[in-house]
Every structure is written in structure tokens, then in C-alpha cells.
């Protein structure tokens, strides 16, 4: 498994999270290599990691995680976000007062409301930035896992007090709204991924409809 996950990471790095043309001129993506098996396995085996080794995360891996985050879909492709990479121990402490952590790296994923204007230049999109930045956050978690790192999403927005606290620590202007702070590091625990699949959460065609 490790080899295939590394293949995804390498693909992300070299392709810039894009596609390329193979020798036979067919489009090649990370998932076309093995029918998506490695990507699905990466999704299914990700789990929140909260204990980390005393080992910094390499800049190359930080770059891959940020590329993965920015590969997320966004409404009208506005990409209304900003990412703050935090390795300063004092700042990590200030951001983690309520839930102390030994993570060597935090990444704050923020919405940028200055980037929510529609292409017509007049109207503003409603709060789709929340969904956009959430999609980026999940991409980042998955990239961390694929790179052999452990990570956990800690919620910020829409808790008003917490949002203001994080924005203040990070010196954010009023258009930059922290949605989540992801803690990242080399795992020092190995919890089993939770199986959350429940048939009762699925309907077909209409609410309550059964699978044919
Ligand atoms: C919006 C959101 C906020 C979260 N906030 C926290 C948090 O503040 N502290 C924490 O330890 N985990 C937090 N988590 C992680 C969840 O506890 C975790 O994803 C959930 O228990 C499922 O476990 P899994 O990630 O291992 O599948 C948050 C997750 C999400 C999506």
C-alpha cells in the first residue's frame, strides 16, 4: 500500500495535481494507474491523528499538502481561500490553548471574502466559501495521510469566539476568516480507522427509497 500511496504523492508533486499526457498520448492521472485503488484506500484508511513524533514536517510535504488543498473544487472556481502555515512553537501554543497539542505544524485554512465576487464584478456569492474551504481541508487531510503524516481537523468557524481568537492570533485582516486549523505531524499513535458506512444513511431516487 505504502508504495502506491507514495505514487500518488509523487504524481501530485510532479503533476502539480494536474493530468499529463502519457506515451500513448492518453491522459494519465494518479488514479488511472491502478483503477483508483490507491486513492480509495487512502480515503478509507485516513483517520484523525492527535499524537505526533518530535519530528518536523519537510517543506516538500507541506507544499504537496497545499497543492492538494488548492486542487479542491470551488463554487464558480473563485478559490476564495488563504492558507497560513504555522511552525512557530509559540503561535502553535497560542492556537491550541483549549486543546493542547504536540503537533509540529498547524495549517489554518481560511476563507477570503474579498474573493467571493461573481465574474460579473458586481454581485457577491453567498457563503459558498465555507464549502470550498471545507473541501480544501479534506483534500489536505488526505494528502497528509498519503504522505505518511497524521493530521486532525480542528473546528474554528462558525464558532464566533473561536474564529475571532484564531484570526487575532494570526493577524488576519477582516476578509480572512479561519474555518479550520489542521494539526499535522508524523504519527505517534495508530488508531484503527472508524467504519462509518451505514446503509440507513442512503436513499434511492426519493428519501426513504430502497436500492433496486
Ligand atoms: C468540522 C470538524 C471539526 C472538528 N473539530 C475537532 C476538534 O476541535 N478537536 C479534535 O480533536 N477533533 C476535531 N475534529 C475531528 C473529528 O473528531 C473526527 O473527524 C471524527 O471523530 C471522526 O474521526 P476520524 O477523523 O478518525 O474519521 C473535527 C472534525 C470536523 C470535520
Image (cartoon, rainbow, N blue to C red):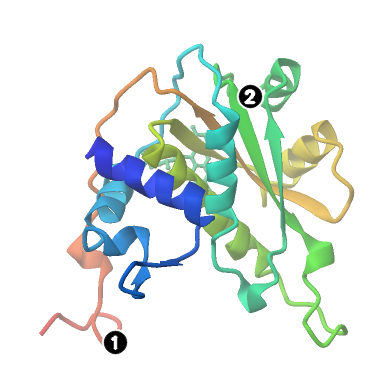
151 left or right of 35 in image: right
> In the rendered structure, which disc, 2 or 1, sits on the residue that comes first in sequence?
2
Give how far across and how far down residue 103 sits, in percent: 55, 21
Q: Say what secondary structure mark 2 lies in.
A: loop
- As measured in the structure, the alpha-carbon distance from the residue carrying label 2 to the one carrying label 1 is 43 Å
Location of the C terminus (image quadrant): bottom left
Q: Residues within 10 Å of mark 1 (few under 14, many from 20)?
A: few
Q: Residue at x 59, y 19 (%)?
A: 100
Tell me the number on the disc at residue 206: 1
Task: Locate residue 144: give its quadrant.
Answer: top left
- Res. 103 in view: yes
Asked if 188 appears above or below 165 in the picture, the reply is: above
117 left or right of 193 in image: right
Q: Residues within 10 Å of mark 2 (few under 14, many from 20)?
A: few
Say if disc 2 is inside 8 Å of ligand 1. Answer: no
Task: Locate residue 120: give its quadrant.
Answer: bottom right
* Of the pair 54 and 200, the residue shown nearer to us: 54
**Where does label 2 land, which residue?**
98
Amino acid at each position: 500500500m505504502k508504495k502506491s500511496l507514495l505514487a500518488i504523492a509523487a504524481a501530485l508533486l510532479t503533476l502539480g495535481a494536474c493530468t499529463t499526457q502519457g506515451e500513448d498520448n492518453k491522459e494519465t492521472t494518479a488514479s488511472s494507474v491502478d483503477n483508483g485503488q490507491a486513492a480509495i484506500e487512502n480515503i478509507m484508511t485516513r483517520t484523525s491523528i492527535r499524537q505526533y513524533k518530535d519530528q518536523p514536517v519537510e517543506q516538500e510535504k507541506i507544499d504537496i499538502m497545499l497543492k492538494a488543498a488548492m486542487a479542491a473544487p470551488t463554487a464558480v472556481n473563485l478559490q476564495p481561500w488563504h492558507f497560513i502555515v504555522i511552525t512557530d512553537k509559540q503561535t502553535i501554543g497560542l492556537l491550541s490553548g483549549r486543546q493542547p497539542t504536540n503537533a509540529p505544524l498547524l495549517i489554518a485554512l481560511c476563507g477570503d471574502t474579498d474573493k467571493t465576487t461573481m465574474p460579473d464584478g458586481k454581485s457577491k456569492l453567498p457563503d459558498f466559501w465555507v464549502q470550498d474551504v471545507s473541501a480544501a481541508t479534506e483534500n489536505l487531510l488526505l494528502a497528509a495521510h498519503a504522505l505518511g503524516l497524521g493530521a486532525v481537523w480542528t473546528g474554528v468557524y462558525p464558532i464566533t469566539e473561536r474564529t475571532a481568537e484564531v484570526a487575532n492570533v494570526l493577524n488576519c485582516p477582516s476578509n480572512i476568516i479561519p474555518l479550520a486549523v489542521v494539526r499535522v505531524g508524523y504519527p505517534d499513535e495508530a488508531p484503527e480507522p472508524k467504519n462509518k458506512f451505514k446503509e440507513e444513511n442512503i436513499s434511492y431516487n426519493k428519501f426513504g427509497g430502497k436500492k433496486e
